[in-house]
Amino acid sequence: MKNPGLAYRKKEFKTGNVVAALFLISFFLTHDVYAQKQPPAAKPLTVLDSMMVKQLFFSAIREKTIENTKHAAEMFERVLQTDPANDASMFELANIKKGQNDYAGAQPLLEKAVSINPNNEWYWAALADSYEKSNNINKLEHVFNQLIRISPEKPDYYFDKANAYVILKKYDDALKVYDQLEAITGTNDDILASRQKIYLKQGKVDQAAAEIEKAINNNPGQMRYYLLLAEIYNSNGLADKALKVLQQAEKLDSNNGMVHLALADIYRDKKNNDASFNQLVLAFSNPDINIDQKVRIISGYFPKFPDAGAKSSALELSRVLTVAHPADAKAFALYGDMLLQNTKYKEAKAAYKKSIELNNQVYAVHEQLVRIELSENDMEATIKDGENALSLFPNQGWMNYMVGVAWAQKKDFKKALGYVNNATSLEIQDKDLLSLSFSLLGDCYHSLNDNKSSDAAYEKALTYNPDNAYTLNNYAYYLSLRGEGLDKAALMSARSNELQPNTPSFEDTYAWVLFKQKKYAEAKVWMEKALAHDKENSSAKYEHYGDILFYLGNTDAAVANWKKAKGYGDQSPALERKINEKKYIE
């Protein structure tokens, strides 16, 4: 099993790092690499051999610097053939092998290097790395003993030695190392935390707690120790003790946000939701707690939506967020989202506008604002804020579509076409947007009397979503007005009513298509459905109903419905003629 890894700072150099390579050369020169102590049985190098070794070594370093590691390795091996005790070449060759993840090949080279030059810290550090990477943890004790011997002032080596003991589950030995380190550096948080982790691994919760309590006694104003002690108790099933510690901390520092967050967790675990929420409010009121941490907490409520309590809590916390972070656009954006979830549209718009005022570079906030404005039929605001967004983010398909919708609603179909065509050219993956955009193009082209382009756009829309009820309805209605493709129109209109039953405008369309097909009895049934479901007293529907009744031979009823249509606002000359002449006028 792979060990958790050690913390020591590895001393090898990256291949290709010119500065590091030059430093290494100077290091070896100053340490008299070429005047190394030879093993007793080694044959002394001749002057010629010594010069050749020196030249090969520097050539190998150059090759390594330009990342020609294969050639460099060959040269280092040639050095070792001539000078088997050349520890510098062993070190360099080992580093090349480590770079190739060949730790098994690097290990014997480094072991020999430290046997030749036992006072070289770099060699021992590289050997420690090799042992760790190859999971030879049991060999690390000796290595770190040597590193501590060479550099007794470096805390890293003590921590690494202790960590090796922990991996080997020699917990008491690790604790002794921390005692040695404490004698050198004095007590610090790293030693404290390391000790308490070992005690917890040993199941000695009381001793782990005692370590932290000792720190609290020495530093009663340091809240981090109270938080650490509470975490030890809480994670070991001692919630009451944890709560007592945190309450003590709260008395000492009532403005500490982290203490309030910890208390919120404890109260939540104890099912005291009101107390937990109150602690969250106190924590959120503290601007010193990172806003991202607060955002994550609010996000934790999202899976509970649409529960009213969860939405209400998230809303209040997001409101507090804006008070604590009044200059952060993220706070107001989140507040806007929560207001939207709670159907407070007016307030949501204000929050989104404030967020944009603080930072206009977040497109999603612009889109949320414009979507609300469009849903409220505020076309002026949709155009104003939408075009502002497009000045910053011109390539956003949905924004182009929404602005196009607003211009179409204002009957400026040529402007609408420009924006909607942009939407279709910018977005090739979003089938929903493409379906809606081509459907809107169909509406615009129809209004501009370009029937050919209108039909083509509707057909395109249906390729992306054949069950878009609005597209089916509009296409069918416009075909019926022209008296073209009535069989196709009937199929599309019938389908729209299947998809979205009891929709009066869809029922009216189907009745009108049937009327155009001279299926007057069926048309009457569907028109009566439309009138039954219509809550707006549409003059067009009453006029259509009168038309159907006329062809069914009920002239008096037809005239009565035409008069109703006039009473509900239809003042067209054709309707006036129908009433006066008591007959259907095309």
Image: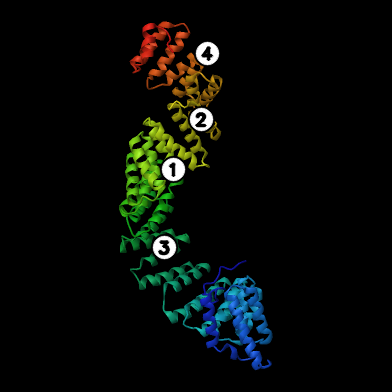
Relative to residue 100, is residue 513 depicted above or below? above
Tell me the SS state at disc 2: helix
Q: Position of residue 477 (x, y in %)?
A: 48, 22
Whether residue 115 sits left or right of residue 176 in the image: it is right
What residue does disc 3 label? 230
Labels 1 and 2 touching (C-beta < 8 A): no
- Point out the tag, 1 or 2, that comes first from the N-terminus: 1
- Residue 519 disc label: 4
Q: Position of residue 359 (x, y in %)?
A: 35, 51
- The amino acid beneath tag 3 is Ala
Tell me the SS state at disc 1: loop
- The amino acid beneath tag 1 is Phe
How far apart are the alpha carbons under marks 1 and 3? 31 Å
Of badges 1 and 3, nearer the viewer stands: 1
Of badges 4 and 1, nearer the viewer stands: 4
- Point out the tag, 1 or 3, that comes first from the N-terminus: 3
- Write the residue at 36% across / 65% down: 223
How far apart are the alpha carbons under marks 1 and 2? 37 Å
- Write the residue at 51% across / 16% down: 514
The picture quadrant where one finds residue 36 is bottom right
- Residue 458 disc label: 2
Residue 240 in sight in this render: yes
How far apart are the alpha carbons under marks 3 and 2? 65 Å
Q: Residues within 10 Å of mark 2 (few under 14, many from 20)?
A: many
- The amino acid beneath tag 4 is Lys
User: Depth check: 454 or 533 in front?
Assistant: 454
Of badges 3 and 4, nearer the viewer stands: 4
What residue does disc 1 label? 305
